[in-house]
Amino acid sequence: MVQFYPAARFDTSFAAISDATRRGVLEQLGRADASITELAERFDMTLTGMKKHVTLLEQAGLVTTVKVGRVRTCRLGGRGLEEEAAWIERYRQMWASRFDELDKVVEQLKQKEESNGRTASE
Amino acid sequence: MDAQRASEQTQGPITTTDRRSEREVVVTRTFNGPARIVFDAWTKPELLMKWWTPKSFGITFISCEADVRAGGTYRFVFGHPDFDQPMAFFGRYLEVEPPRRLVWTNEEGEEGSVTTVTFEERDGKTLLVLHDLYPSKAALDEAMASGGIGGFPEQFEQLDILLGSLPSAGSA
């Protein structure tokens, strides 16, 4: 009933984890946050190469990065899918509560119209 | 399609929510009444005040002004016993097309959404579709990250804390 993520988002996620290095980065970040430089060293890659991997993971919502000074630190998820799902659910609850009340208003207005209609035709 | 529609009707009113795109959230609900009645309930302040703040929210209207015509403005002011200051929500109506379509801006926060509500009548019932369109993906992400709902930033974060502390909130 509640559809959280469009299909395109799943595609991005699958593309992000289809690569062995990127899966390794996720495992690594699961143990501890790391800078792009640290990740590049650990996976024996250039800084530019690692940046590309991290960007893909970021686009998929699997990794967030924060730049402090000249160091960009990467961590898992963060404001990822769970947060979005929770927000969407609260948003739905807010409208569902309002709409339950609106149902009553619509019902009252309908009854009023019907009784006015009867009075007019009698 | 027909089967799905039939099952929706037998299940009663269901509110669905969907992140339709990077910057858009959509809510749908069917009401058991003609579109002109549902539209009235969204556009006449004395009716709007009856349903916009359900008891479970813990907030009450202090005032509700709405000049419902294209270019007209609205201003809803809410209060809660625990808030020092009343909360004001305001914006402008961009399109008013009774009883089919209503579009307004939400201007109380930076980068607020534009809300479009359409009313589609079928067999005496009205399918309501509400779109909240944010100016950018970043704006919707930001709204989600702040914990606010529907372009109501910070204040709703406080409200969430409040609601969470109420015994009835979990069961509602």
Image: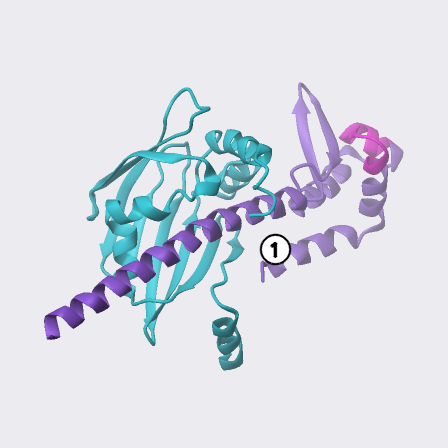
Chain colours: A purple, B cyan
Q: Amino acid at mark 1?
A: Tyr
A30 in magenta: yes
The crowding category of the residue bearing disc 1, from other C-alpha atoms within 10 Å (few below 14, some 14 to 19, many at least 20), is some
Name the subunit of mark 1.
A
Question: Circle 1 sits on which residue?
Answer: A5
Above or below, A118 against A22 in this view is below
- B92 displayed left or right of A83: left
At 69% from the left and 21% from the top, the residue drawn is A70
* Residue B83 spot, x, y in % from top left: 44, 23
Q: Nearer the viewer, residue B147 or B53?
A: B53
Q: Nearer the viewer, residue A104 or B79?
A: A104
User: Taking the image as drawn, is residue B100 in sight?
Assistant: no
Please identify the dominant SS of the magenta region.
helix
Residue depicted at 76% across the width and 40% down the height: A49
Say left or right for A45 vs A59: right
Specify the segment rendered in magenta. A29-41
Residue sitting at x 14%, y 69%: A119
Q: Quadrant of residue B61?
A: top left
Asked if residue B148 lies left or right of residue A50, the reply is left
Count of residue discs: 1
The quadrant holding residue A107 is: bottom left
Viewer-proximal residue among A45 and A78: A78
Residue B118 position (above or below residue B43): below
**SS under mark 1:** loop
Residue A40 within the segment the image draws in magenta: yes
